[in-house]
Amino acid sequence: MNMRIHIDQHDGFRHWILAASILIFGVDLSGAEPLVPGTGILLTEVGDDFEDEGWEYLYNNPKSTYENDKEQRYPAGGSKNGRWYEGMKRGQPDVIKRVPTPKGGLPGSRGSLLLRSLYTGIPGRPSYQMQQDDFIADVSSRVGGAISISRSPSVVVRVFLPPVATWEKRTGPHFAFRADVETTVTKPSGKARFSSSQRESETYWPGLFVAFESQADGRDNNYAYFSIRADEWGHDFRGPQITTTGWWTLGMSFTPNGMVHYFAKPGIEDLTPQDHIASQYPYGYRCERFETFFFDVLNSDDGRTWSTSFVIDDAHVYCLR
């Protein structure tokens, strides 16, 4: 990869970092090219490999259901190792359990994490429509604040997709791997015709959804694919078809130009440039800060049907500097 470097008294340090990144990592920190997730330095303070045999999640039920009934129920759930917590907007999955790593997982991995839900809405009050639970990694508080996009953060996870015959028989998203990121926007500060404006932080949540078209809903065939959130207008769009179940490696990266890059490949091998599936400015925003990442578990919330059983392993955050 070639890059012309011009240095002046104002931009010298920034360009020195760009040049060093090319020499050391073979990547362009300016964001001109998609950054392969997993590039750079592993942040050991966050993420999880679930290898601790004593790994445990404390549910502290009942869970929060603020999105449905404005109820935030404390104390919130969280893992004993302090690396995961309940999402207060929607609540945590009903099953968060360390399990033996499914066949074909990372070499040497003995433990992974099962995520599954029955009551994705308000427990005991089925809504009979799609709902979701959130399982959130604690990143920003463990590293001393949000990570600037100038550091080119990325996140990688392995996800086990079970055989299609075991999936919830429902068309729509079943699982998601997402990020919590921020930008700065200009908003009006009043309702008057000539009101002033002010700069405010805006949070948004890009990600990869595992979506499914089910024969049970009249489709010709069962069909799984990635749905990507989102394009510059805020619309989800269809990504590649999922042609095999078992282990997949998913990743997202965030480059200094404010762009979000999405990667996916079947198997457990590290991601490469060939696994890039999309790059976007979701909602037209340029990302400035990375807060955390999380997983969504979705189902029909009918009080009877469990969500599809997904297993995650080795969820890690990296930074170039």
Image: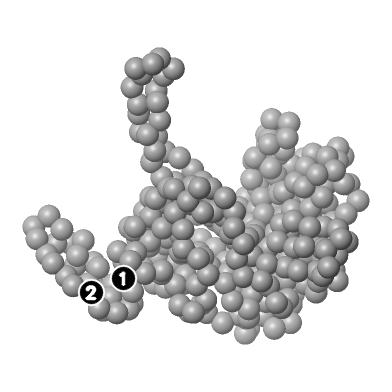
SS type, badge 2: loop
The residue to which callout 1 is attached is: 28
Applied colour scheme: one colour
SS type, badge 1: loop
Q: Quadrant of the N terminus?
A: bottom left
The residue to which callout 2 is attached is: 3
Determine whether label 1 and label 2 are within 8 Å by CB.
yes
Look at 83% across and 68% down and name the residue there: 220
Task: Find the residue positioned furthest to the top.
Answer: 192
Give 2 or 256, whichever is nearer the viewer. 2
In the displayed structure, 210 sits above or below 160; it is above
Indicate the quadrant where residue 127 lies: top right
Indicate the position of residue 99 as horizontal and vertical percent values.
75, 70
Look at 75% across and 46% down and name the residue there: 131
In the displayed structure, 315 sits above or below 121; it is below
Task: Find the residue positioned furthest to the left.
Answer: 9
Look at 86% across and 71% down and name the residue there: 165
Disc 2 marks which amino acid? Met
In the displayed structure, 88 sits above or below 245; it is above
Callout 2: 10 Å neighbours few (<14), some, many (20+)? few
Give 34 or 236, whichever is nearer the viewer. 236
